[in-house]
Amino acid sequence: MKPKLENVPLTSLSTTPNNSFIPMLLIGILFFVFGFVTWLNGALIPFLKIACELNEFEAYLVTFVFYIAYFVMALPTSSILTKVGYKMGMTLGLGTMAAGAGLFILAALVGHFASFLFALFVLGTGLTVLQTAANPYIVCIGPRESAAMRISLMGIVNKGAGFIVPILFTAWILTGMEPYSEQALASLTDVQREIALAELSNRLVLPYLLMAIVLVGLMLFVFYSPLPEPDLGEKVQSSNADWKAILKYPQVILGALTLFCYIGVEVIAGDSIGLFSQGLGVAHFGMMTSYTMGFMVIGYVLGILLIPRVISQQTALTGSALAGLGFTLGILFSDSQSQTVSQFLLGWLGVLPIPDPVLYLALLGLANALVWPAVWPLALQGLGRLTATASALLIMGIAGGAILPLLYGYIAHSQGDSQMAYFLLLPCYAMIFYYAVWGHKITAKETQPDVVALNE
């Protein structure tokens, strides 16, 4: 006897302003935490490349370890949320992140790259729990048609944090890096170099101590908050039957693959821009992730203004894919010595000019902004009780942030051409375009008639 799966609507919480304000506020705080911790990697990569004496491929192990945690921990997270609920899951996620920040302090004191990677994995594990709980929560807190708008609002908070953190990191950590340049370190004896690198690594202790304190405070804040628990249907334990059922929903499988490609290109755009800029002689390379995040914030604002009043979530996703393809071609074929496009777009704002390929790379933030908020509601449509399981599967797509940047780093290092290595982005945006136009329409009802029987 197969389990009966009720087709529970996604709008499970009251959507009146009084009832939705507190949940939106609390989730917004969590999305700020997502952005702060996640986009710190963009400035951390060139820092650890110096402090741990890494080549370009090794430096991208930072993103690999951080994002592979999403893939490894997504299934256990689904079981945790089913047992303890979304609110307690967020609390556990924040506690895990606080532990990761503490491990990062120990790694800074020890100075071994493997210790940093382990701490990053723990941080990524905590974020996995938070993301798996928070994203469907935002979808379920109101009408599905405006879900992309709500996630866009959260995206502004997330990428706003991503805009701020590289600036803070550069001002606090990357100031006075002249004694640690490749030429300066080469002139030192082995003992002197080890002392200098240890001093550089110790710069991370105080920032991550403050991060751990803030995360513990947020954990207690969420635990004692009045955040309601979304009602997604029958309260049953996650089982193999749930996973067998969810695998019969092609829009979820293709959605996970789309998010794999999207997270990969988003992380490449946000985390590789620092090293790419450094290679082209940009002095303020540590702040370059802020350029990408700034354009993403603009994209999220457009999402809030236009979705669903002017354009649909599907149209936004299609436009994002086409923009991504266009900007990628700009990265590949623009002159690395030219700053013409940068001066035209940003010069009137008084922003320091940057090479054109770097600007096109930053503009991918604009193309990427609406992909995440558009894919989630399209993929979760009509899943009811299977929402948590589907969410875990979609979260597994974040593994793209682990694999694709590492692949980019390998290509750039082996070919000695960081600019042309960005050709990797083209098939990823092609997949996003496919899902926007055709993939999300391939539903269980059309391709798997037996699934309908489960819902009767």
Image: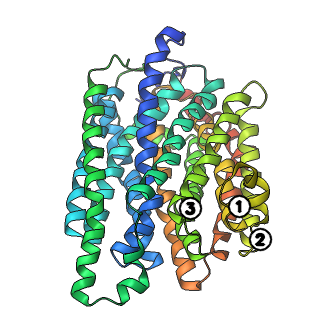
What is the quadrant of residue 221 in the picture?
top left
Neighbours of disc 1 within 10 Å: few (<14), some (14-19), many (20+): many
Amino acid under disc 2 = Ser
Residue 183 is situated, as x and y percent measured from the top left of the image, at 43, 86
* Label 2: element kind: loop
Amino acid under disc 1 = Tyr
Please report contact status of discs 2 and 1: CB closer than 8 Å, yes or no: yes
Q: Residue at x 68, y 48 (%)?
A: 366
Q: Quadrant of the C terminus?
A: top right
Task: Name the side, left or right, on which 5 lies relative to 299.
Answer: left
Residue wearing tag 1: 360
Residue wearing tag 2: 334
* Label 1: element kind: helix
**Which label's residue is closer to the chain start, 2 or 3?**
3
**Which label's residue is closer to the chain start, 2 or 1?**
2
Residue wearing tag 3: 268
Residue 368 is situated, as x and y percent measured from the top left of the image, at 64, 49
Q: Residue at x 59, y 84 (%)?
A: 415
What is the quadrant of residue 195 in the picture?
bottom left
Residue 233 higher or lower than 184, as above or below: above
Task: Name the side, left or right, on which 78 lies relative to 16.
Answer: left
**Which label's residue is closer to the chain start, 1 or 3?**
3
Residue 217 is situated, as x and y percent measured from the top left of the image, at 26, 33
